[in-house]
Amino acid sequence: MSDIALLLKSYRGDIDYARRLIESFSLNNRDQLTMHCVVPAEDVELFSSLMRENVVLHAEEELIGGHLVREPVGDLRVGYANQEIVKMSFWETGLASNYFCVDSDAVFIRAFGVSDFMRDETTPYSVLVEDNDLKVDPVYFERHWRGRERAIRTIMHEVGLEDPIMRTSHGHQVFSNVVWQSFVSEFLKARGWTYRDALACSPYEFSWYAMWLQKAAPIEIHQREPLVKVFHTEEQHLASLMEGVQESDLARGYLAVVVNSNFSRGLGVIDATGDKATALAPYLSYQELARLGLTKFRNSFRRGKPN
C-alpha cells in the first residue's frame, strides 16, 4: 500500500482525454507516483494501449464489483453513478492510504509530487472552498449553483453538520481511507445504507466526503485551495482566452487544468490555453475567426510588430 496514489475513473467515450492526461501525468510525475486507471471490463483492451510506467489498469467489475449498480440512481445514469461509486469505494482495495481523484479531461501543467497532496507522511491536504467566485458568476449561478447548493445542504443536514458556511469541492480531492472508513462504519452502516443510497439522497460524492470530514473530523484538516483549475462553463473559458492567460500563468497556482468536457465535448479535445486565434477557433465560425485574425494583425501592426 502506498501513502498516496492517483485515481482515474474513465471509459471508452473519454479515451482521447485519458490519453492526453496520461501523457501529461508521465511528463510531470516528479516522485514516480502510481495512477490507477479504472474502466469497465469491456474497455480494458481499448485502454491497454495507454498504459505505461506508473499507470496501472483495472476493470471496475473486478476491483469493486459488489458496489456497482445496474439501474439509474435518481437522476444519475448507470455509468455516471458507477463513476461516483468507484471514487467513493476505491479505499476498500487497499491499494493506497490516500488517493487524489483526477478527471479524464484534466491536463497536468507542471511537475508535482507527494508534497502537493500530503501535509505529512499520513495526513493528506483537504480541498475545501466556498466557491464564491462561482456563486457570483451569473451564468453558473443560473444553470448550476442553486440546485447544487440545495443538494449539498441536504448532505450537511443528513450528516448533522450545522454550519452556515458551505465548504466542499467539485472534484480533484485528496481522499483519505480513514475518512471513508469512518463514513461507512459510522454513517452508512448505522443507517443500513450503501454508497448507492447516499447518491440517491444527494448525487455529490465529493460533498459527502467533505461534509463528513468536517462533521466527524477523523483526520486533522489541513485546508488547501483547489489544485486543479476548472473552466466550468464555455463563458469562463472564453473569458480566459480573451484575457490571454497562458499555461505558464495557470501553473503558478495549479497542478492541472480542466476544460470541462460537459460543455466542450462537441468541440473535440481542446486546449485550455494557447495562441488566442488558435485557442478560440473551436468556438468561432470561419467568418468570426477571420475577423479575429484581422484584428490581431492590425493591433500588432500598430505596435510595430507585425507577424
Image (tube, rainbow, N blue to C red):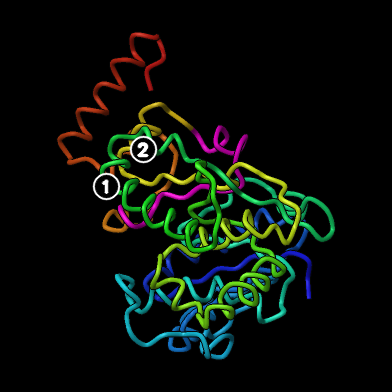
| Residue for badge 1 | 143
Q: Amino acid at mark 2?
A: Gln
Residue 146: x %, y % from top left: 32, 47
Along the viewing direction, whichever of 145 and 266 lies nearer the viewer: 145
**Circle 2 — which element?**
helix
Which label number is shown at residue 236? 2
Camera sees residue 276: no
Residue 230: x %, y % from top left: 46, 46
Dot 1 or dot 2, earlier in sequence: 1
**Circle 1 — which element?**
helix
Quarter in which the N terminus is drawn:
bottom right
Res. 288 image quadrant: top left
Q: Is disc 1 surrounded by few (<14), some (14 to 19) or many (20+) residues within 10 Å? A: few
Instruction: Work out which residue is located at the far left of the displayed protein and give it.
Output: 287
Magenta-tinted stretch: 246-263
Q: Amino acid at mark 1?
A: Arg
Look at 50% across and 81% down and name the residue there: 194
Look at 54% across and 77% down and name the residue there: 38
Mark pair 1, 2: CA separation: 13 Å
Question: Which mark is nearer the camera, 1 or 2?
Answer: 1
